[in-house]
């Protein structure tokens, strides 16, 4: 089945220790998104890629970076995680062809910062 | 720019009762509208979407929603809920131009009691 896969599902890191979360998709979608979701809150868009074009949200901290080496993969790098970065990180994809269609979400990676 | 307001943060309801989850939006451009469901520790799953055409949209799991342009609303309804419908529900809007940038509401927690 075509899908969005996130690894790992649970990630524990130490304060200040860099961490990378990964997302892959078999949908061949041209847009990939990274969201941060804290408990009982809406997903907050960090950035998205439209093909190779990177689009950063204005309020995304510099601590968060992303890479999309090819259509299928997208990575979220947190350079120096703080306690406030503990959250669920959701990857999503969509196919933009002149219409903003629905997003397909992965199961998320829950990040714990010790 | 667009915004989404989900009018109820929590909706408790008894099993087999009808339910309505309310969503209002504002936007300076035409938008597409979506409802997603999120079960604990999972990503978001599309319930239904309105892109154009009939204002009454039917989705999965017996849910439906009605787009009301004059009232800028997109309320979600189900005539008879099940225990398994207990989850977080998010309303989202996307502009009908340019890729990306969905805006999510803060979510409504639906709790179905036996």
Image: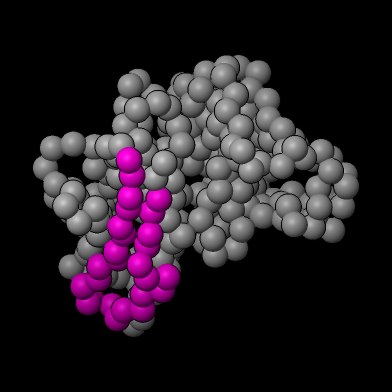
Give the mark count: 0
Relative vertical location of residue B102 with respect to residue A112 in this rendering, above or below = above
Query: Looking at the image, which residue is at 73% across and 52% down?
Result: A85
Task: Look at 20% across and 56% down and name the residue there.
Answer: B71
Q: Is residue A112 above or below residue A94?
A: below
Residue B26 placement (x, y as % from top left): 33, 50
The quarter in which the N terminus of chain A is drawn is top left
Q: Quadrant of residue A96?
A: top left
Residue at the extreme front of the image, as rendered: B28
Q: Quadrant of residue A69?
A: top right
Q: On screen, A18 above or below B41?
A: above
B60 on left or right of A110: left
Query: In front: B2, or A11?
Result: B2
Q: Which residues are magenta?
A: B3-28
Residue B63, position as x, y percentages in the image: 24, 57
Confirm whether residue A93 shows in the render.
yes
Please report the residue visible at 44 percent of the width from the left and 50 percent of the height from the top.
B104
Q: Along the line of sight, which residue is nearer the eye, B70 or B60? A: B70
Quadrant where the C terminus of chain A sits is bottom right
Residue located 56% across and 48% down the image: A44
Q: Is residue B2 magenta?
A: no
Q: Nearer the viewer, residue B102 or B57?
A: B102
Dominant secondary structure, magenta:
strand
């Amino acid at each position: 089945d075509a899908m969005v896969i996130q690894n790992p599902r649970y990630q524990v890191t130490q304060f200040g220790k860099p961490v990378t979360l990964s997302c892959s998709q078999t949908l061949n979608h041209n847009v990939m998104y990274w969201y941060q979701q804290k408990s009982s809150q809406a997903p907050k868009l960090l950035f998205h890629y439209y093909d190779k074009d990177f689009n950063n949200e204005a309020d995304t901290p510099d601590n968060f970076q992303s890479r999309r080496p090819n259509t299928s993969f997208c990575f979220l790098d947190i350079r120096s995680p703080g306690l406030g970065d503990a959250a669920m990180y959701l990857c999503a994809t969509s196919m933009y062809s002149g219409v903003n269609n629905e997003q397909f979400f992965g199961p998320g990676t829950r990040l714990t910062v010790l | 720019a667009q915004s989404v307001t989900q009018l109820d943060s929590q909706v408790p309801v008894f099993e087999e009762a009808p339910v309505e989850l309310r969503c209002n939006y504002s936007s300076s451009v035409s938008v597409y509208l979506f409802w997603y469901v999120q079960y604990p520790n999972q990503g978001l799953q599309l319930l239904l979407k309105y892109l154009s055409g009939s204002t009454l949209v039917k989705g999965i799991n017996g849910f439906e929603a009605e787009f009301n342009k004059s009232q800028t609303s997109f309320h979600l309804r189900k005539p008879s809920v099940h225990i398994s419908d207990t989850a977080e529900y998010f309303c989202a809007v996307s502009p009908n131009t340019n890729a990306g940038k969905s805006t999510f509401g803060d979510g409504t927690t639906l709790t179905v009691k036996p």
